[in-house]
Image (cartoon, rainbow, N blue to C red):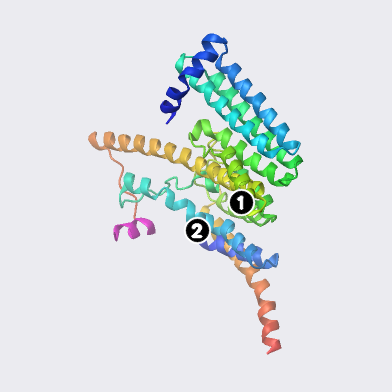
C-alpha cells in the first residue's frame, strides 16, 4: 500500500523537492502547520473546514515519507520529527475539540495518554493501530447522521483501541524475547545431549501431566 | 502464587470494601482473572520447547501481570471512574512478588530481572502463611454475616 501511495505522490514529491527545494523534514513541519490551522478552525467552531484542513495535513504528512524514500533521505531523526509532528497535530486537534465543546477534557487527555503509550512502545513492538484521525472523520459523520456526540464516541474508541494496543504490544515484545530465549535453550540442550552430559528430566508437574493427556 | 491465595485475597478485598455489581467483576478480573489470560499466552512456546516434559522455572509471565501493566491499568481505572482495577492488580502483584521465580517488572522498557520480595524465605512457607492468614480473615468477615442471617431466620 505504501509503494502504491509513493507512486501516486511521485509527481507532487518531485515538485516539492526539485522545484521548491523542500526537504522531508520541512514537509513534516508544513504538515504540522496545516494541522495547527485545522485545530484553529475546529476551536473556532468551523468543524467541517477544520476536518478538510486535517485531511490536507494528512496528505502532506504522507508526502514527507514518500519524499524521503524517493530521494533516499531517510533518517532516524526524520522519523522522530515525523512522529513528533503527528502527535502534536493530534494533541492540537483534541484540544480544539475540547475548546469547541465537542469532547470532555478528561476523555481527550485519556485518549492522548493512550496514544502516547503506543508511541513510546512502537519502536519495540512495531505495532500501532493507527486510524486516530480517521476516527475523528467517523465521529463527525456519526454526529451528522444520528445527532449524537460523535466526536466523544470517536474519542472513546481511540482511547480503548490504543490502550489495548499498548497492552498487546508489551506482550508481543515479551513473546519475541521468550522465543529467542527458548531457541537458545533448545540449542544448548542439543549441544549437551551431543556431548553426553544432558541434564536429567525434572519430575512431572500438574501441567505436564495435563498436557500428556492430549 | 497459585490460584487459591489470589482468589482468597480478592474475596477478602471484595468483602472488606463492600463491593457490588460491576466492581466485583472488576476486582476478580484484576485480582485473579489476569492470570487466566496471561499464562496461556506462553503455552505454545512452552510446548514447542518442552513438549510434555517439565520445566519447573519456565518464564510463564508476560508484562500483563508485571508492574509495567500499571501504565495501562491506571488510565483504565480513571476511565472507569473506579480504583478497583489498580487496587486489585496491586494485590495480585504483591502475592506474585512473594514467590521467587524470575520477574521482569519493567520489561520492555528496562531489562531488570528480580526474584521479588524475601527471596531467601521458602516459597512454600510464604504461600502457606499467606493462604492461612487470608483464609482466616475471609472467615472472620464471612462469619458475622452468616451469623446475622441465621439469627434473622
Whole-percent x, y for residue B79 in the image:
67, 51
For label 1, count other residues whose C-alpha is less than 10 Å away and answer few (under 14), some (14-19) or many (20+): few
**Occupied quadrant, residue A188:** top left
Q: Is any atom of residue A205 visible in this view?
A: no
Whole-percent x, y for residue B141 in the image:
68, 72
Q: How many marks?
A: 2
Q: Chain of mark 2?
A: B
Relative side of A46 to A133, left or right: right
Relative side of A194 to A33, left or right: left
Relative side of A55 to B48, left or right: right
Residue B67 sits inside the magenta stretch: no
> Which residue in the protein does label 1 denote?
A145
Residue A42 lies, with reference to residue A9, above or below; the image says below
Q: Chain of mark 1?
A: A
Whole-percent x, y for residue A123 in the image:
52, 30
Residue in the picture at 43% in, 49% down: B41
Per the rendered image, the range of residues in magenta is A206-214
Amino acid at each position: 500500500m505504501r509503494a502504491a501511495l509513493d507512486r501516486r505522490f511521485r509527481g507532487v514529491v518531485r515538485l516539492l523537492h526539485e522545484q521548491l527545494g523542500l526537504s522531508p523534514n520541512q514537509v513534516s513541519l508544513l504538515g504540522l502547520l496545516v494541522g495547527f490551522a485545522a485545530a484553529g478552525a475546529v476551536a473556532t467552531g468551523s468543524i467541517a473546514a477544520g476536518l478538510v484542513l486535517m485531511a490536507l495535513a494528512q496528505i502532506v504528512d504522507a508526502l514527507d515519507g514518500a519524499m524521503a524514500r524517493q530521494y533516499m533521505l531517510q533518517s532516524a531523526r526524520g522519523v522522530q520529527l515525523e512522529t513528533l509532528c503527528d502527535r502534536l497535530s493530534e494533541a492540537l486537534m483534541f484540544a480544539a475539540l475540547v475548546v469547541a465543546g465537542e469532547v470532555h477534557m478528561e476523555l481527550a487527555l485519556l485518549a492522548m495518554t493512550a496514544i502516547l503509550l503506543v508511541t513510546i512502545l512502537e519502536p519495540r513492538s512495531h505495532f500501532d493501530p493507527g486510524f486516530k484521525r480517521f476516527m475523528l472523520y467517523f465521529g463527525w459523520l456519526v454526529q451528522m447522521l444520528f445527532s449524537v456526540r460523535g466526536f466523544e464516541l470517536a474519542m472513546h474508541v481511540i482511547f480503548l483501541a490504543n490502550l489495548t494496543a499498548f497492552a498487546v504490544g508489551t506482550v508481543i515484545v515479551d513473546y519475541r524475547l521468550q522465543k529467542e530465549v527458548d531457541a537458545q535453550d533448545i540449542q544448548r540442550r542439543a549441544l549437551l545431549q551431543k556431548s553426553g552430559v544432558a541434564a536429567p528430566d525434572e519430575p512431572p508437574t500438574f501441567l505436564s501431566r495435563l498436557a500428556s493427556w492430549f | 502464587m497459585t490460584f487459591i491465595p489470589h482468589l482468597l485475597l480478592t474475596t477478602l478485598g471484595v468483602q472488606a470494601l463492600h463491593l457490588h455489581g460491576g466492581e466485583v467483576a472488576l476486582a476478580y478480573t484484576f485480582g485473579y482473572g489476569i492470570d487466566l489470560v496471561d499464562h496461556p499466552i506462553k503455552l505454545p512456546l512452552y510446548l514447542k520447547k518442552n513438549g510434555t516434559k517439565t520445566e519447573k522455572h519456565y518464564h510463564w509471565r508476560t508484562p500483563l501481570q508485571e508492574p509495567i501493566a500499571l501504565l495501562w491499568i491506571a488510565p483504565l481505572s480513571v476511565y472507569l471512574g473506579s480504583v478497583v482495577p489498580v487496587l486489585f492488580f496491586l494485590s495480585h502483584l504483591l502475592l506474585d512478588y512473594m514467590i521467587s521465580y524470575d520477574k521482569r517488572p519493567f520489561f520492555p522498557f528496562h531489562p531488570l530481572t528480580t526474584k521479588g520480595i524475601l527471596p531467601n524465605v521458602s516459597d512454600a512457607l510464604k504461600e502457606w502463611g499467606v493462604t492461612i492468614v487470608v483464609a482466616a480473615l475471609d472467615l472472620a468477615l464471612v462469619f458475622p454475616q452468616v451469623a446475622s442471617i441465621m439469627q434473622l431466620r
